Image (cartoon, rainbow, N blue to C red):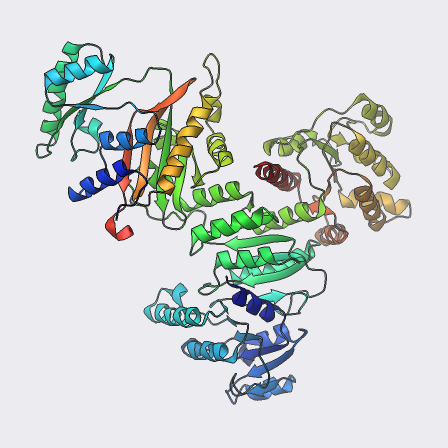
């Protein structure tokens, strides 16, 4: 991507004037609403007499064409019917906008001749003009600081530091929502759609160069230019973490090959190779994507694999060790000094003061919990400390002491800030799903990694361990 | 059309294309790989039983003999391969048997003769080193356990070329069968440096030779001291892939 294209994208992401073309009542004016809180003036372009009154009622100025809009438009959202799209894109190019995002679908993704031809026309037009067309068939752009969104339901604010890019509009949109629930702050989310003018490699490079983007995630189904993407990934992943969620993993391209190698080179095998070569992080679901981001943003960097664990669900220590063992993490013996501290305080029958600590009834107070965590953190045999918090059980006990879950979370926060090892909470099950969701949300809001199960915690921790080890290897050359 | 730092490759590729072939013969493929510094069991062509016997004597027994025909790509399917030939008489007999059996199976194939190559010592671990040109990523390199393991278990790993030193080490360590290479029970660890060398040589050669579509070195026998490619096949890009 050249400097002009990049500067134009910057302008579209930080617009002063936004034009929404073709928004309508039947979709509840979704695009006007998505940008109505932007730090920009928003105008409508609509010629349908039936639609204009509703738009004016919402307080937007309306114009009959992009050309008629006074001032320099920076970002255009296009939601017109398919046959009109090329003309509106041509107008957007003429207007000198930084970018136009084309929500309109029905192009090459349909496989129909008309759709393919229209897409080809758009491709030629935008290429000739060196124009930033986002999409088509996309949910446009999100930038939390500028207040532009894929959907009016999304959070906006000043704290964002994650960049996301997605082949799917649903995932571009829901990433932002789920990231917030998980205590993370999205900055930019790009719905790439058919990405005919700005492709996957361009977007990756763009997010890579954005100094406010601290880490990058993506949902990708494929890329038009694998070599370009590989080179962009090699470059970007060396500077900031990149988490890749690849869709379409079981679709094997039909390969007529005269060699074993040609026959076995499936799409996923090559994406895996690329991820290993560049030191990116692979995930397979949206839940895993969230878990990886939490581990990345909230846990201190680590290359060790020795877990120190406080478990509460009782009698599960074998399963807990199994969960971490499956991911190549270990649950080692502690030092005698640690045992000397723990043995007198883990007194419950059937419990264990050995790692994983099986404390159930011995976790009698917040101070007691802190003592257990401090002991695990101080032990030279551990690299990572996690605690399982089974909330119904703890909540009742704390209540009797005149304390609440917030006090427990305060303790976690203070513990995390005091120790130099990475820390995470596992909030497994509870009879009250709403209380559990509330508890997880509160932990996440304090910038503490919280996982829904031992297995999920183990997977995320292993992935991040691999990431930090690989980055060390790559840096060493 | 043919662009390569290797004049031998360019000549061979041009000759194959002129003959309407995209698949280079084992002899052609191995000569090209040998020039790239890869150790191979180099075949010598014999056009008579006597030539086969003297070729066998000069490479040293035991030898492997294979039918040589540009039109037969799966030599063992036509009974065109004999292993463990221990003396000159056996070499003479093998020549006649191979030619007869290949002619019976493929009556219309032009047979150039029979190749003779030294038989690599037993005890090596069979691995495969390969390359294919992906429409998205360009040249990619594959490594795995060879022989039946590659066909049944598909225990292979890939890297996008060109490979760094770390990539060449990593592609070997990625396969599940990696412990078979590091020594188990009484067997000794194989020479991983030598394997990495083969992988790096293939990677840099294909990266500068766009005319190659696919390649298998299968198997490469890995020993505690070095490795050798005992079969190899290079496939050229079709003109329209260009």
Compared across the picture, whether B57 is left or right of B150 comes to: left
Quadrant of res A457: top right
Compared across the picture, whether B236 is left or right of A94 comes to: left
Residue at the image position 82 percent from the left and 26 percent from the top? A338
Q: Position of residue A14 (x, y in %)?
A: 63, 70
Decide if residue B153 is in sight here: yes
Decide if residue B82 is in sight here: no
Compared across the picture, whether B232 is left or right of B227 comes to: left
Q: Looking at this rendering, what residue extends furthest in the right direction?
A: A402
What is the count of numbered marks?
A: 0
Q: Is residue A36 above or below residue A404?
A: below
Q: Position of residue B230 (x, y in %)?
A: 30, 24
Residue at the image position 42 percent from the left and 33 percent from the top? B200
Q: Is residue A434 above or below residue A16?
A: above
Residue nearer the viewer, A29 or B15: B15
Q: Position of residue B85 (x, y in %)?
A: 21, 13
Residue at the image position 28 percent from the left and 22 percent from the top? B41
Quadrant of res A55: bottom right
Residue at the image position 36 percent from the left and 64 percent from the top? A111
Q: Position of residue A130 (x, y in %)?
A: 46, 69
Q: Is residue B169 above or below residue B226?
A: below
């Amino acid at each position: 991507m050249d400097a002009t294209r990049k500067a134009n994208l910057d302008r579209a992401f930080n617009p002063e004037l936004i034009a929404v073309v073709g928004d309508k009542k039947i979709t509840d004016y979704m695009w006007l609403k998505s940008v109505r809180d932007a730090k920009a003036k928003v105008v409508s372009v609509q010629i349908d007499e039936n639609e204009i009154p509703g738009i004016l009622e919402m307080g937007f100025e309306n114009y009959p064409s992009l050309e008629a809009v006074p001032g320099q438009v920076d970002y255009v959202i296009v939601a017109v019917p398919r046959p009109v799209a090329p003309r509106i894109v041509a107008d957007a190019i003429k207007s000198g906008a930084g970018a136009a995002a084309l929500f309109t679908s029905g192009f090459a993704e349909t496989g129909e001749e008309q759709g393919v031809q229209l897409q080809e026309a758009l491709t030629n037009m935008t290429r000739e003009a060196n124009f930033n067309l986002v999409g088509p068939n996309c949910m446009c752009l999100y930038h939390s600081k500028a207040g532009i969104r894929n959907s009016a339901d999304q959070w906006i604010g000043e704290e964002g530091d994650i960049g996301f890019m997605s082949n799917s509009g649903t995932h571009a949109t829901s990433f932002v929502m789920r990231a917030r629930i998980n205590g993370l702050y999205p900055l930019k989310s790009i719905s790439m759609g058919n990405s005919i003018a700005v492709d996957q490699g361009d977007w990756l490079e763009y997010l890579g160069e954005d100094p406010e983007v601290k880490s990058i995630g993506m949902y990708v189904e494929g890329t038009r230019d694998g070599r370009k993407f590989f080179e962009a990934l090699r470059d970007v992943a060396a500077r900031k973490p990149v988490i890749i969620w690849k869709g379409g993993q079981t679709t094997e391209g039909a390969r007529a090959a005269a060699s074993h190698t040609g026959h076995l080179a499936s799409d996923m095998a090559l994406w895996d190779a690329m991820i290993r070569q560049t030191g990116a992080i692979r995930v397979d679901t949206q839940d895993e994507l969230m878990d990886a981001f939490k581990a990345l943003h909230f846990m201190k960097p680590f290359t060790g694999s020795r877990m120190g664990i406080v478990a509460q669900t009782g009698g599960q220590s074998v399963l807990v060790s199994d969960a971490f063992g499956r991911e190549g993490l270990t649950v080692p013996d502690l030092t005698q000094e640690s045992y000397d501290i723990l043995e007198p305080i883990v007194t419950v029958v059937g419990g264990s003061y050995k790692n994983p600590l099986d404390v159930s009834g011995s976790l009698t107070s917040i101070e007691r919990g802190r003592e257990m965590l401090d002991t695990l953190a101080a032990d030279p045999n551990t690299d990572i400390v996690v605690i399982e918090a089974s909330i119904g059980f703890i909540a009742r006990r704390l209540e009797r002491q005149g304390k609440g879950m917030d006090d427990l979370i305060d303790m976690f926060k203070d513990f995390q800030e005091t120790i130099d090892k990475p820390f995470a909470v596992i909030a497994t099950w509870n009879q009250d799903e709403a209380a559990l969701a509330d508890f997880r949300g509160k932990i996440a809001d304090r910038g503490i990694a919280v996982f829904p199960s031992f297995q999920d915690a183990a997977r995320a921790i292993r992935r991040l361990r691999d990431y930090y080890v690989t980055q060390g290897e790559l840096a060493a050359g | 059309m043919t662009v390569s730092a290797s004049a031998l490759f360019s000549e061979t590729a041009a000759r194959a294309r002129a003959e309407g072939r995209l698949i280079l013969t084992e002899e052609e493929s191995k000569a090209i790989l040998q020039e790239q510094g890869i150790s191979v069991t180099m075949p010598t062509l014999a056009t008579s039983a006597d030539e086969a016997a003297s070729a066998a004597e000069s490479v040293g027994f035991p030898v492997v003999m294979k039918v040589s025909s540009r039109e037969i790509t799966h030599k063992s399917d036509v009974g065109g391969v004999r292993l463990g030939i221990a003396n000159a008489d056996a070499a003479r007999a093998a020549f006649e048997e191979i030619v007869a059996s290949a002619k019976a199976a493929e009556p219309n194939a032009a047979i150039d003769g029979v190749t003779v190559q030294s038989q690599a010592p037993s005890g090596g671990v069979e691995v495969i080193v390969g390359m294919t040109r992906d429409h998205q990523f360009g040249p990619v390199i594959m490594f795995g356990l060879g022989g039946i393991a590659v066909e049944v278990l598909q225990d292979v790993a890939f890297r996008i070329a060109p490979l760094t030193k770390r990539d060449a080490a990593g592609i070997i360590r990625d396969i599940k069968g990696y412990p078979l290479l590091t020594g188990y029970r009484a067997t000794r660890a194989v020479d991983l440096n030598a394997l990495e060398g083969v992988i790096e040589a293939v990677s840099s050669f294909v990266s500068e030779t766009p005319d190659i579509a696919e390649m298998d070195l299968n198997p490469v026998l890995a020993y505690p001291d070095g490795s050798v490619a005992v079969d190899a096949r290079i496939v050229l890009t079709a003109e329209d892939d260009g």
